Image (cartoon, rainbow, N blue to C red):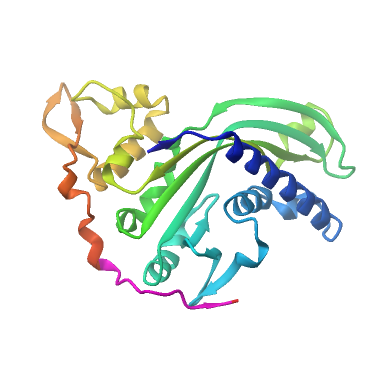
Amino acid sequence: MECTLSAQQIQRFAAACDAARMDMTQRQEKVSGIGTLCEKSLHAAVKRFYEPLGEMHEYRVGRYVADIVNEHGITEIQTGNFSALPKKLDAFLRVAPVTLVYPIVHQRKLCYVQASTGEIFSRTRSPKQGQYTDAFWELYQIIPYLFHPQLTLHLLLVDVEEIRLCPSAGQAGKCRAQKGDRIPTGLYGMYHCHTRADYLGLLPNIAQPFTAKMFARALKRSEKRAGYTLSCCRKMGLIRQESQKQGRAYLYSYETVQPENETAANESYFPSANHIQVDS
């Protein structure tokens, strides 16, 4: 479900961003080049937002290190590439409730920096805008875990300033720019997913049945990306393929979720435990 952000949450995220920027500045003094810090600021800010106390960060749970362990359970923050998550979730879900946090870039301001001098020579706003449904691009890799009763997914829409490292100033340098750190500047939205109804709530309001092209238009994404989302939603049991076609195009409809079916069929995959065994 979509959460209404309070003024306190927005201020707390801003404070977490400020703290992450200070950390980044301190790290820059110890390493050579901004590029070595790629994407760490976003992860650090979100971690501070969920748990300001540093002693609750980076706990070993079995073979893996969890971002946060506190009275709420385990919180794992993933800024991209979910391929390594299944093994972690398999371990974490056996011992505690898990909150998986995925920050999605909502508005992106590109900051072009000459790598040799650190001088900013251009700032421009990217026309691309992130949305909650972009999460399906990564969720495909953890479908068997999504409806586990101990897992809750938090999607954050975050505005960022993305550093682009350029070998030289000017347009020629921009063409050869490399992505650097993503520095969060604000929290735009938050959505919590725990049930099939929550995931269905992410999908666009569209007349049914619909074709893949119609779905792409409603989603405001390319046909390739929309097709990937459609495939993921079918595997999640959110969308079904109808028996009839519209010309040569397949037709699809949203599944109807019954309250009694909200408990995941894969509940028995992972046994629960009453404690978290950690090594600090």
Question: Does residue 245 show up magenta in the picture?
Answer: no
Q: Quadrant of residue 244?
A: top left
Residue at horizontal 88%, vertical 45%? 116
Residue closer to the observer: 134 or 278: 278
**Whether residue 180 can be seen here:** no
Q: Nearer the viewer, residue 230 or 131?
A: 131
Note whether residue 123 is visible.
yes
Name the magenta segment's main secondary structure: loop
Q: Quadrant of the N terminus?
A: top left
Q: How many marks?
A: 0
Residue 278 sits above or below residue 37 on the image: below
The residue depicted at 81 percent of the width and 40 percent of the height is: 167
Report the side of 211 relative to 61 (left or right): left
Q: Is residue 276 magenta?
A: yes
Image quadrant in which you'd find residue 122: top right
**Figure check: 255 above or below 88:** above
Where does residue 193 sit, x and y in percent of width and height?
Answer: 37, 45
Give the quarter of the image for residue 8: top right
- Of 8 and 77, nearer the camera is 8
Q: Which residues are magenta?
A: 269-279
Q: Is residue 19 left or right of residue 233?
A: right
- Tell me residue 58's x, y (percent): 60, 67
In the picture as drawn, the residue positioned furthest to the left comes out as: 243
Q: Position of residue 73 (x, y in %)?
A: 46, 64
Q: Residue at x 42, y 75 (%)?
A: 275
**Measuring 70% from the left and 32% from the top, which residue is drawn there?**
110
Which quadrant is home to the C terminus? Answer: bottom right
Residue 106: horizontal and vertical position, in percent? 55, 33
